[in-house]
Amino acid sequence: MTLTPEQVLAANKANLETLVGLTNKAFSGVEQLIELNLAAAKSTLADSQKQTHAALSVKDAQELLAFQASLFQPLAEKAAAYNRHLADIATGTGSHFQGHLESQFADAQKAFNALVDNAAQNAPAGSETAVAAFKTAVSAGNNALESVQKAVKQATDVAEANFKNITETALNAGKTSSKKR
């Protein structure tokens, strides 16, 4: 199987377009992260200013305790919101890369299978058993790889769900804790 110059150029062009697309998606994720962090910093600065003014206006120990108790719930909610937004950015960017890698892997797998079929058709007479054994091994390898990919996807989904549950549990615990005070 010989590649023509046009095929090489087309493959290089496709690879360059893919690289540019993935780079743009990575920069988009970084931009979102920077925007999130800037918004969090602005919010924290504004909250600190408000809390400082409120702390300076406290007149007795009872007000101080109430003031301290009032600080925890908004802080927990903001931390949970920040973590959710961060997870959304990471998930969105990661799923784009994962989808692209899965597509590239599927294309490579098809090309390899075509190569194996071509080699099998051009195999010398009497090698049918060896060719069949090789095809069986390739098929078993493909099946194992697909199983691993499914397991990784399931593990990722479970980890995402656990992260969301932990965040919600922590947020609810913070609400319960601040109500008791």
Image (cartoon, helix red, strand yellow):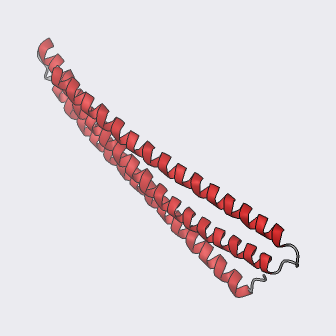
The quadrant where residue 42 appears = top left
Q: Do we see residue 121 in this rendering?
A: yes
Image position of 85 (left or right of 141): left
* Residue 4 spot, x, y in % from top left: 74, 86
- Rendered location of residue 138, percent (x, y): 71, 63
| Location of residue 27 in the rendering, given as x and y in whole percent from the top left corner | 48, 60
Using the image, determine if residue 157 lies above or below residue 123. above
Q: Which residue is drawn at 43% across and 53% down?
A: 91
Q: In the displayed structure, would residue 32 be above or below residue 130?
A: above
What x and y, as percent, mark residue 81?
30, 43
Residue 48 at least partly seen: no
Residue 35 appears left or right of 175: right
Quarter of the figure with residue 55: top left
Q: Which residue is drawn at 65% across and 61% down?
A: 142
| Quadrant of the snapshot with the N terminus | bottom right
Q: Residue 75 lies in what quarter of the image? A: top left
Which residue appears at 73% of the width and 76% of the height? Answer: 117
Up/down of 5 relative to 140, above or below: below
Please state if 76 lies on the left or on the right of 154 as rendered: left
